[in-house]
Image (cartoon, rainbow, N blue to C red):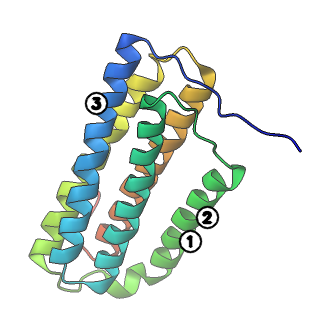
Amino acid sequence: MTVQFAQKVQLTQKERMLLEDQKSHEEVCIKQYRDYASRAKDPQLKQLFNDYAAKEQEHLNTINQLLNGQMPQMSSSQGQQGNQNSQGMSMGQNNNQSASQGQNYNQEDALLCQHMLMTEKYVSGTYDTAIFEFQCPNIRQILNHIQKEEQEHGQGIFDYMYQHGMYTPQ
């Protein structure tokens, strides 16, 4: 019988400060996604926001593990799963774009999407900065994985907005 012990994490003061910032960002995202899911009129948007709230909770759990001195165990399927979900959504939405563009959309749903897209852009940028400040390659990889999922959230919101005529790139 083999016993595996979790790898201990030693953080510098700056690394701890950056993780505390990311923790607060994740907490805000969870709260906003949950609140916006309850306010959204479109059931598809409600589901999108609820899904992203769950992913943000996973991010928060990972950050808390690091802050508690534990190296989170990441399976190789985590990155693949996020990719498949994002690609599946994009492909499905692309097939319906021409049918739904020009439809009227709920103004509040559009505002909720705009706000969350702006939030995801900001949070992704803060992860970009944090990644370069960590000494441990494993932690950098974990933060990079989270950042990629934040970017996928932004992509999903953008795709939803584009599909529903809320966002027209010029």
* Percent coordinates x, y for residue 36 in the rendering: 19, 68
Q: Nearer the viewer, residue 105 or 24?
A: 24
Q: Nearer the viewer, residue 121 or 68?
A: 68
The circle drawn on residue 88 is 1
Residue 79 visible at all: yes
Mark 3 vs mark 2: which is more N-terminal? Answer: 3
Mark 3 vs mark 1: which is more N-terminal? Answer: 3
Name the kind of residue labelled 1 in the image: Gly
The circle drawn on residue 84 is 2
- Do the residues bearing badges 1 and 2 touch, measured as CB atoms within 8 Å? yes
Q: Quadrant of the N terminus?
A: top right
Q: Quadrant of the C terminus?
A: bottom left
Q: In the image, is 125 to the left or to the right of 89?
A: left
Name the kind of residue labelled 3 in the image: Asp
Q: Which residue appears at 15% of the width and 75% of the height? A: 39
Q: For label 2, count other residues whose C-alpha is less than 10 Å away and answer few (under 14), some (14-19) or many (20+).
A: few
At mark 2, the secondary structure is helix
- Do the residues bearing badges 3 and 1 touch, measured as CB atoms within 8 Å? no
* Percent coordinates x, y for residue 16 in the rendering: 37, 21
Residue linked to disc 3:
21
Q: Which residue appears at 29% of the width and 58% of the height? A: 169
At mark 1, the secondary structure is helix
Q: Which residue appears at 39% of the width and 46% of the height? A: 60
- Cα distance between the residues tagged 3 and 2: 29 Å
The circle drawn on residue 104 is none
Q: Nearer the viewer, residue 74 or 48?
A: 74
* Percent coordinates x, y for residue 24 in the rendering: 25, 39
